[in-house]
Image: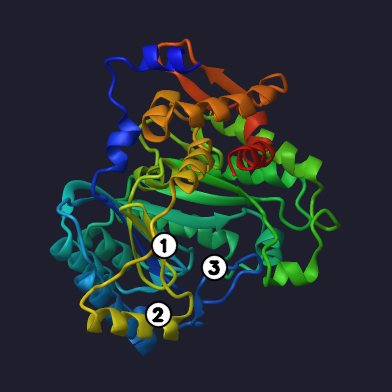
Amino acid sequence: MSDRLATIGQGQQTEQGNEFFEPPTSAYVHIPFCRRRCYYCDFPISVVGEARGENSGTIAQYVTLLGQEIKITPIFDQPLATVFLGGGTPSLLSAAQLAEILTGLDQRIGLQTNAEISMEIDPGTFTLAQLQGYRQAGVNRLSVGAQAFDPDMLAACGRSHSVAQIYEAVEIVDQAGFDNFSLDLISGLPGQTLADWDFSLAAAIALAPRHLSVYDLTIEPGTVFERRYQPGSDPLPSDQATAQMYRCAVQTLTAAGYEHYEISNYAQPGHQCRHNRTYWQNRPYYGFGMAATSYTHYQRFSRPRKRREYFQWVQSLIESQGSIDPPQTSAKDRLLETLMLGLRLAEGLSPVALQQQFGPRAVERVYKCLESFQSQGWVELQLDSPVAQIRLTDPEGFLFSNQVLSALWQELD
């Protein structure tokens, strides 16, 4: 296999390898505030009820500290190609606060003229004037947290918005001049049937988002759902039912013209999320804000998950003049991360790039492990084609990705 890979790789550059050693050109900014905590959520957030950025001292204090972190963080001489403001509910910020954050990033690191600047927003948390202000500040891509188009499903997962507010939100997004927006949906909710799921998919398609993120419910430790339900028991749909929901999403969304480019993500041509591809390609990125993770120079570093501890950490960062020295990620861990993230993408991974990064022996072990899954129809190993690939099949390989990744982990650990 090594000889075949060497032949394939002659005269080619390893895109993934070259990009991996470049300075980071993406930044994630965590906005941790929500009106209330959804029943499935284990994210690091602070519940603020009906408070908004313009009238909340807590939010204002956070934005100030966030700006100080950005200002003191060591940077590389490369402007940002993507920024993602996630949460939490970033749309609880005022337009002025959002502009303050983006201005801080531009002054400290720089923003490319065509940078993708994404922002998560929840129905019922913003006005037309607010979105217009976000757009003026530089936001050009929105991710709307719809989750379901059934009032019972929304109530079942503790969402604070109604179905009517989803439609109102999309109308405001259009009025504000945003052409590029995404919708989030969740399958496998308590009491959800295949018919319910099919209805939500159809409703989402009718709104013509450029992008759709479709997630299967996971029962996380410490959540309301963990206290209420045991995985696999009523009223949660069975594993067979959720698998069928996944297959239904693939069939329905691809038939509607969406590319299934990642396990949980679909896009109209030309509208894949550039920022999230940074993660899936295991490329470097900055992280800012409470609980945010950064990955630069093979060093992965996470900030404190609670607001008070994060504030203390920023103060210590200022006192140390930006000194952060986390341990480097080992070559073995980088290989495992590259496999686990890259196999989420429809195009999979290039064995040539893997060999150039990690050596022929590592790729031989990966190939040996994955060969056993070919007969099950879960993995495709294309080594003799003009563009060599290691990829999971769609939908079955994606459905059983955990088994495949577990086998890789055991083989390489």
Q: Quadrant of residue 399?
A: top right
The residue to which callout 2 is attached is: 310
Amino acid at the residue labelled 3: Phe
Q: Is residue 41 above or below residue 377?
A: below
The answer to the question of whether label 1 and label 3 lie on touching residues, with beta carbons closer than 8 A, is no
Q: Is residue 193 above or below residue 13?
A: below
Amino acid at the residue labelled 1: Gly
Q: Which of labels 1 and 3 is toward the front?
A: 3
The structure residue drawn at horizontal position 49% and vertical position 79%, both measured from the top left corner, is: 46
Residue in front for this viewpoint, 262 or 35 = 262
Secondary structure beneath dot 2 equals: helix
Q: Is residue 342 above or below residue 237?
A: above
Q: CA distance from mark 2 to mark 1?
A: 17 Å
> Pointer 3: residues within 10 angstroms few (<14), some, or many (20+)?
some
Residue 386 horizontal side relative to residue 102, left or right: right
The structure residue drawn at horizontal position 29% and vertical position 85%, both measured from the top left corner, is: 315
Residue in front for this viewpoint, 360 or 12 = 360
Q: Quadrant of residue 136?
A: bottom left
The residue to which callout 1 is attached is: 86
Disc 2 or 1, which lies upstream in sequence?
Answer: 1
Q: CA distance from mark 1 to mark 3?
A: 11 Å
- Residue 257 can be seen in this image: no
Residue 101 on image: x %, y %:
25, 69
Residue 41 on image: x %, y %:
60, 67
